[in-house]
Amino acid sequence: MIEIKNLTVSIEDKRVLNDVNLYIAQGETIVLLGPNGSGKTSLLNTIIGIPEYRVESGRILFSGKDIIGLTIDERARLGIGIAFQRPPAVRGVKLKDMLRICMEKRGDFDEEKINEFAQKLNLLSCLDRDINLGFSGGEIKRSELLQLLAQNPGFIMLDEPDSGVDLVNINLVGRVINELLEKEKMASKRTKAGLIITHAGYILDYVNADRGCIMVNGTVICSGNPRDLLEDIRTKGYEGCVRCLN
Amino acid sequence: MSKLSAGEMAKKAVKKPSAIGPDIDLNAYSAEVKEHGKIQRLKELSGEVKEKAISVGVDAEEACRSGSFFQMDHSVILSSAYQKGIEVMSSTEALKKYDWLSDYWWKAVNVDADKYTAQAELKQNHGYFLRTLPRAKVEFPLQACLYMTRDGLAQNVHNIIIAEEGSELHIITGCTTAPKVRTGLHIGVSEFYVKKNAMVTFTMIHNWAEDVEVRPRTGTIVEDNSIFLSNYVCMKPVKTLQMYPTAYCVGEGATVRFNTILFAREGSNMDVGSRVFLRARGSRAELVSRAITGGGDIVTRGHLIGEVPGIKAHLECRGLILSEKGRIHAIPELEGKVNNVDMSHEAAVGKIAEEEIQYLMARGLSSEEATSAIIRGFLDVEIKGIPEHLKREIRKAVSMGEERLM
């Protein structure tokens, strides 16, 4: 589904990604672990095409097509979706408007679906509010997932979907992520792929990931069973990961 | 010494410039224009006039209006009320009809405020008189249109609006020019009297030409437990526009809200504010403005004056700069004269945040579509308390301006 080859990226003069290689197959879900500032969010922002993230070298292939050079909306329309960690508030643009946008762009706007999705994420009361304006941390996370439900992308990137979500709602968040990633289907029948950033790993109690990757200093340094990796990080810290490689 | 008459006071102010805004040479505009014949219903208007009137919220079919007033240049061509309990006529006619009207004439606006108010007194060309009788409630809004057909003309109107006790009045006023008109001067004095337990909503839409100069002068007296809601929209070019409508909450529990939506493109100079004196316990005021410049100059003002304890007032002023050439100067002022007043303001001026555009693009909108969605959202001021069809007129006027923005 998506293949990242030798990707090096800078913001202004600061290098944020350094020779990243990553392959995510159709039907696969990967969790991305790493300390603050290691480049996890930079990788997602580069994949979606935020212009500040200047690709110095390397390729990003989505379904075999190099997407570097495409604008954000072109990537979105190809089927790349993202739940941002800290999305901006947009005054006057209601959550409902955003859902309409997401649906219209994929050509099947359905008012009933909006309510159904919102109910599923416990966000009916937010539909007529300006998006993210005064939303709680948990509402922001759920609203991002709600937009992805409406958008229905093939490749789903989630930037810390579990941070700021209370224990009651994390179960809900997990359920919706599983729905987005078609976890109810047999692995071989899934058409979606996912890349999830998690800091504390809470989401792994609700979403089954196939593989984990650790990023340190802008590079993917290690991959393996996500639970094993998380356990290593819990016991030895990221310093342990770095030492392990040296 | 005897008190000076309004005329005498006006004469003393004929050269007095406005405290703010560009000065205008009043002699540059003509007072001469032919009289226009009366009509019975607005549908008799020519297609060209009708089209422009519709652009400022006029319902030419009059199906959803309780009454209509139409002034073309210096001629009142129609003034009709279609519901009991409402009076619609020219203000000059009303002055002849009602002796008591002098008690309202120049009582909410000072005749000698500046040379524009002076000109409205000394060279008045009608204006409208709208009144709801006690406890009358309009089913549909009253509409008024002030229309200019001659290039270089000065139109000086004096409007009086009275909502008697317990009544409810919704007004939509549209001011515009014939398509061929480029220059002109419009001076519009409006005095509103909202009596006890009454409600007035006033929606004004302006659609002038590139070289028209506009000086509205508005004062509103708001009595006990009454409500005055004003919505002003100007999305079309104008040479200079300067207005600072002022409301006086003189009765306990009086409520005032001003919403202002402005778009100034290159060559337009707008200095628009709203001011409320809160003079009675429990009075409330809210001023909300949205200003966009696509190259023009905008000064957006707001002034709240809390004179007694127990009042509450808020001012919100936002500006969006879409062009390198444009300028927005926001001047929010709060003036508390006693303790125990609750007054606040928020103001923000800037360009559209790139991050917001990118956010919408990540959902599939192009950069242009994202920008227009954000602008539409910016202009979507929540307008409470007015009938749905008036909200539609406001949305229509705003979206017609938006088309030029994109």
Image (cartoon, coloured by chain):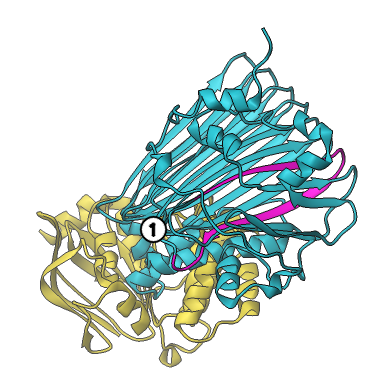
Chain colours: A yellow, B cyan
- Amino acid, disc 1: Glu
Residue B106 in percent (x, y) is at 66, 30
Asked whether, in this view, residue B182 is left or right of residue B74, the answer is: left
> Vertically, is B190 above or below A19?
above
- In the picture of the structure, the residue carrying the numbered disc 1 is B210
Subunit of mark 1?
Answer: B
The stretch of residues the image draws in magenta is B154-180
Q: Principal SS element in the magenta part?
A: strand
For image coordinates 45% across by 79% down, the residue present is A181
For image coordinates 40% across by 67% down, the residue present is B404
Residue B376 in percent (x, y) is at 48, 62
> Vertically, is B332 above or below B76?
above
Residue at the extreme bottom of the image, as rendered? A189
Foreground residue among A22 and A112: A112
Determine the secondary structure under disc 1.
Answer: loop
Q: In which quarter of the image is the C terminus of chain A?
A: bottom left
For image coordinates 36% across by 77% down, the residue present is A76
Foreground residue among A31 and B155: B155
Residue B162 can be seen, yes or no: no
For image coordinates 49% across by 82% down, the residue present is A182
Foreground residue among B315 and B354: B315
- Quick check: is B175 in the magenta stretch? yes
